[in-house]
Image (cartoon, rainbow, N blue to C red):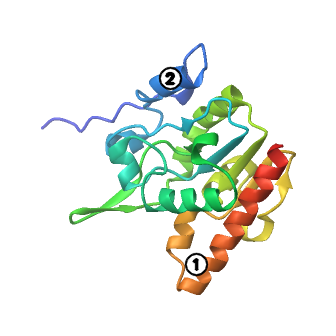
Amino acid sequence: MSEKKTPPIAPTESFLPHKRTIASLRKAAAACRGCPLYLQATQTVFGEGKVDARIVLVGEQPGDQEDLAGRPFVGPAGKLLDRALAAAGLARTAVYVTNAVKHFNFEPRGKFRLHKRPPATSIKACRPWLDAELEALRPAVVVLLGATAAQAILGPAFRVTRDRGKVINGSFIATLHPSALLRAPDPVAREESFALLVADLKLAAKHAK
């Protein structure tokens, strides 16, 4: 009986290209084997948007539709984000959007794939890609959408509910993830949370100037 082979995992840094532009990073990330999430995901979902964007938005990870399309924020949460950006006076085409983790982590449930929070090991393994993106982009403001993105950058003790809506370390603003609004218990709570998200995006727009 043959032994089960361990899936090939290598340090993320070994996949980073020597010349780090957004285009070269996107191409290199497609082959990343820095954590086991690539084994079940359809593909790497890298960031996209203006390479000279003053504002970068960082979410948690791609969802089901993003995994299939290979593009970030194209599902229900992405549509809600687009609405919030428009309400804040920002065009989606004027910003850059990405995620802290570039592969979809999910739990199969019949015909469906249910979102599952990425493990800390995958968040850590994917950090070099996010760092390289930010270094290549050099934005004025980084908006961290939700706890995973915020804690990946600002540390595990950070709480979005406590510290959202502030400019931290000169360039970071943490706010709610659009998917949290979709899980709101009722329309009133959803609209209240939407107003907070819009206010934080307006703060990002003001600070970016």
Point out which mark residue 116 bears.
none
Q: Nearer the viewer, residue 36 or 59?
A: 59
Gap between marks 1 and 2, in whole Å? 40 Å
**In the rendering, at what x and y percent does residue 186 appear?**
53, 86
Residue 23 visible within the image: yes
Where disc 2 sits, the SS reads helix
Q: Three-letter amino acid code at disc 2?
A: Phe
User: Within 10 Å of the Cα at label 2, are there few (<14), some (14-19), or many (20+) other Cα atoms?
Assistant: some
Q: Residue at 27%, 63% (x, y): give it.
A: 112
Q: The N terminus lies in which quarter of the figure? A: top left
Whether residues under marks 1 and 2 lie with C-beta atoms below 8 angstroms apart, the answer is no
- Which residue is nearer to you in this view: 31 or 75? 75
Left or right of residue 11: residue 39 = left
Q: Nearer the viewer, residue 209 or 13?
A: 209
Residue at 80% across, 65% down: 163
Residue drawn at the location 53% of the way across and 29% of the way down: 12
Q: Is residue 14 visible?
A: no
Q: Quadrant of the C terminus?
A: top right
* Residue 119 x %, y %: 51, 53
Q: Quadrant of residue 6?
A: top left
Q: Residue furthest left?
A: 1
| x and y, in percent, of residue 132 in the image | 64, 29
Q: Which mark is residue 190?
A: 1
Q: Judge from the rendering whether residue 170 lies leftward or rightward of residue 59; answer left or right.
A: right
> How far from the left and from the top, in percent, is residue 180?
56, 69
Camera-side residue of 33 and 76: 76
Q: Which residue is mark 2?
A: 15
* Type of amino acid at the residue the image marks with label 1: Arg
Answer with mark 1 or mark 2, whichever residue precedes in sequence. 2
Secondary structure beneath disc 1? helix
Q: Quadrant of residue 96?
A: top right
